[in-house]
Image (cartoon, helix red, strand yellow):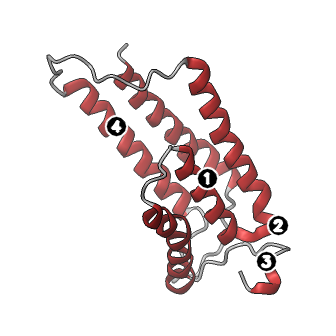
Amino acid sequence: MPKPVLRGLIIVAFFALTAFALVPAFVPRPAFIPGFAPPPDMWPRTVSLVGIALGALALLFAVFRPHPDEAPIETDGSSPARMAGRFAGLMLAFVLFLVAIPLLGFLVSTMLLTLSIVLMTGERGHRIWIALLAFGAPILLQLFFHSALGTQFPKGVLTKPFGF
């Protein structure tokens, strides 16, 4: 099976598992929901369904896209051990994010996670864009969700006195 087809199948399977098994099992849905409020499982289910659609789109492109006759593009020559190290670093960043949320709150933890992920990609040249993405985007997202939807984000023990 070609890699792009396998990748599309894995994406669809992951988001289908999330949408149809994990969200119903782990996101409680109250018996009564006021007419103006979305249910708690709305956003996780929406993200999962969009993920399924994107995985299906990737699968369709993998199957029906014409294959180029030219040679594949050279990569950086990363060995499987180096790729495994990158994956382990990515997983460590997410674990540290989950550990940091109760201490630093959602906003500061998201800033640190975004900054670390961008730096892990190897991007170092566009410092203004990195700063805007790592610090500005989480602030804008939190402002939008707080003001438009009334979403409350966790405040950390260490950042609560500062209002983060």
Q: Earlier along the polypeptide chain: callout 2 or callout 3?
A: 2
> Which residue is nearer to you in this view: 77 or 10?
77
Q: Assign a secondary structure to mark 4.
A: helix
> Which residue is nearer to you in this view: 56 or 145?
145
- The residue that appears at 34% across and 37% down in the rendered structure is 56
Q: Nearer the viewer, mark 1 or mark 4?
A: 1
Q: Which of marks 4 and 2 is in front?
A: 2
> Which residue is nearer to you in this view: 160 or 112?
112
Q: Assign a secondary structure to mark 2.
A: helix
**Amino acid type of the residue that numbered disc 2 sits on in the rendered structure:** Leu
Does 157 appear above or below 122?
below
**Amino acid type of the residue that numbered disc 3 sits on in the rendered structure:** Thr
State how far apart marks 1 and 3 are (Cα): 20 Å
Does 4 appear above or below 26?
above
Q: Is residue 50 left or right of residue 98?
A: left
Kindly identify which residue carries mark 1.
116
Check disc 2: other Cα within 10 Å, few if <14, some if 14-19, many if 20+: some
Q: Which of marks 1 and 3 is in front?
A: 1
State how far apart marks 1 and 4 are (Cα): 30 Å
Q: Which of marks 4 and 3 is in front?
A: 3
Q: Earlier along the polypeptide chain: callout 1 or callout 2?
A: 2
Q: Is residue 1 left or right of residue 69?
A: right
Task: Say whether marks 2 and 3 touch (CB < 8 Å).
Answer: no
Kindly identify which residue carries mark 3.
159
